[in-house]
Image (cartoon, grey):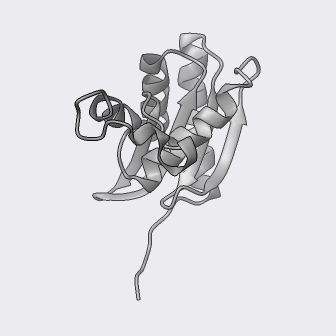
Amino acid sequence: MITLRRLDLTDARTLIAGARTKAEEIGVPMCIAITDESGNLIAFERMEGGKVTSTTIAIDKSFTASAAKKATHEYGKASQPGAPAYGIASAIGGRLMVVGGGLPVVVEGEVVGGIGISSGTPAEDMQVAQAGIDAFLATL
């Protein structure tokens, strides 16, 4: 038998609130997705003005970060021509994201979920995702 730790809806709301605060601070309305440790969606918010096309991207960034247990920008580096994971972006029906903005949520060394952000640049998305995680970890 395996005992799993995963984010719940209250945790997801905390992550979203922290990300939203940072997105408002930098002036970029974002799509924010939170998944459990298996990549299943828990909660989603498209801020007023967040790009409609970023809805699926944010969800898939969160899916990648939690289910693959790796930040999406790390896959970006590893998936370039000649790199060890070249072509991985087409895996899982194209759901595996290789653009920055998806981060695993780690508690005591264990991935308990993921956060995916989209609508800004990859650097802005990563900054907002980290702010969500920081807000969540501050509650533990």
| Residue 14 showing in the rendered view | no
* 100 left or right, relative to 28: left
> Which quadrant of the structure image shows residue 18?
top right
The number of numbered discs placed on residues in the rendered structure image is 0
Along the viewing direction, whichever of 99 and 50 lies nearer the viewer: 99
122 w.r.t. 11: above or below: above
The x, y position of residue 51, in whole percent, is 70, 20
Q: For residue 85, what is the image quadrant?
A: top left
Residue 29 locus on image (x, y percent): 65, 18
Q: Residue at x 74, y 17 (%)?
A: 49
Q: Is residue 114 left or right of residue 118?
A: left
Q: Relative to residue 85, is residue 44 drawn left or right?
A: right
Write down the quadrant of residue 57 in the picture.
top right
Q: Residue furthest top?
A: 27
Q: Residue at x 70, y 36 (%)?
A: 45
Q: Position of residue 63 (x, y in %)?
A: 53, 48
Furthest-bottom residue in this view = 1
